[in-house]
Image (tube, coloured by chain):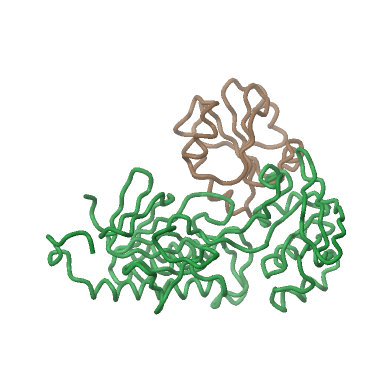
Chain colours: A brown, B green
Amino acid sequence: MAEGVDVLTDSTFDEEVAGADVTMVVDFWAEWCGPCRMVAPVLEQIATENAGKVRIWKLNVDDNPLSARKYQVMSIPTLLVFKDGVAKKRIVGAKAKAALMADLSEFL
Amino acid sequence: MSDTRDVVIIGSGPAGLTSAIYSARANLRPLVIEGELSSTGDQPGGQLMLTTEVENFPGFVDGIQGPELMANFRAQAARFGAEFITEKVTRVDFSERPFLVEVGDVQYRARAVIVSTGAKAKLIGLENEMRLIGHGVSTCATCDGFFFKGETIAVVGGGDSALEEATFLTKFAKKVYVIHRRDQLRASKIMQERAFKNDKVEFVWDSVPVELLGDTMLEGIRVRNVKTDEETVLEIAGLFVAIGHVPNTSLFVDQLDMDDNGYLVTTTGTRTNVEGVFAAGDVADHVYRQAITAAGTGCMAAIDSERWLESQPHESEIAGTPTEW
């Protein structure tokens, strides 16, 4: 199982996220979003510490507008939590690690 | 007991980080408890982390990005030995000495404390507001403007931040209403001129928001004209609120003197009512609220605290004295 955070795109979204048996978290972000950049290292940590239980992806909304539109992302950072290919939870805004872990705990 | 710091700085905007630069250069080994991640204005680096171009910070002829400016402040403080903890203070006790600053289960002791926790943007307080955050209601124009390409949106407020956001948002939106409760603006002349000559900005004067419409997504806002009591619905996909700030002072209730709006009260420079506790930046300033004034008072707090520490008896001299002062 890969550690760290991998890059997801419009064209790989369904294939990677739908067919998964572990929890998938997609981080919608952009270069120009300060809070997105702040939360990125926290997500790296969570991904590494929970490898095998959760896989975290980052999706750049500038380059991948279709996925952002499809999932009605209107604020970033937004984390979408997928289980069995279905979006189960939406976490909006940058948060500290403990708060993110609490949000994700039901899926881990 | 944990080891005692000379200076603990709570908060890491321009005020806190400038204090850290000066305290570190005075060899006071400051510990900066910089806060934790959020998107609402109280994150490490402070309010500038949610802005784009800063055009009025002296020394940057062509402007600088807010997050980059704050990264520079932090690196400069670190260069002189300031230490950082990226967490939020959960409790303080300024009635005992050395002062107690708690982060969860961890206790820090400090001979002097500089409070620079800043202020964060106010919400309107409407029923659906929290639920619609991320679904049209935004606390960060620079983060979310992008998602409103070709849409009609609204900004609430009449100050500099409101007009700055409105002007910025016209890069994406086809129309931006500025809803303001009076018939004139508080904003600076340059920001007013920019907004007035922007064809995409339409002012909705003398009006206050009364209801947010939309179930899963924001669809509109009902506003009431305060002079005529007439109500109108504006169809909007996005709402950005810039109606002012509240100081982040809940930690200090019953310990530090505050004014009616919760801002810390300082006298003779940056002194609070507790000797050895100093306040800098927006947490004690509802008048100027600029990065440069915050940095200026941060510098003052560092100098005030350094002089105050020098005037205090050394620890060896106070050993054995009662802790009640």
Is A95 situated above or below B69? above
Left or right relative to B77: residue A46: right
The location of residue A6, given as percent across then percent down, is 57, 36
Q: How many marks?
A: 0
The location of residue A68, given as percent across then percent down, is 72, 40
The location of residue B95, given as percent across then percent down, is 31, 59
Q: Quadrant of the C terminus of chain B?
A: bottom left
Is B132 situated above or below A49? below
Left or right relative to B264: residue B198: right
- The quarter of the picture where residue B22 lies is bottom left
The location of residue B72, given as percent across then percent down, is 48, 65
Residue B224 or B116: which is nearer the viewer? B224
Rendered residue at 44%/50% (across/down): B88
- The quarter of the picture where residue B242 lies is bottom right
Rendered residue at 31%/68% (across/down): B276
Rendered residue at 72%/34% (across/down): A11
Left or right relative to A24: residue B219: right
Residue B69 or A60: which is nearer the viewer? B69
Left or right relative to A45: residue B144: right
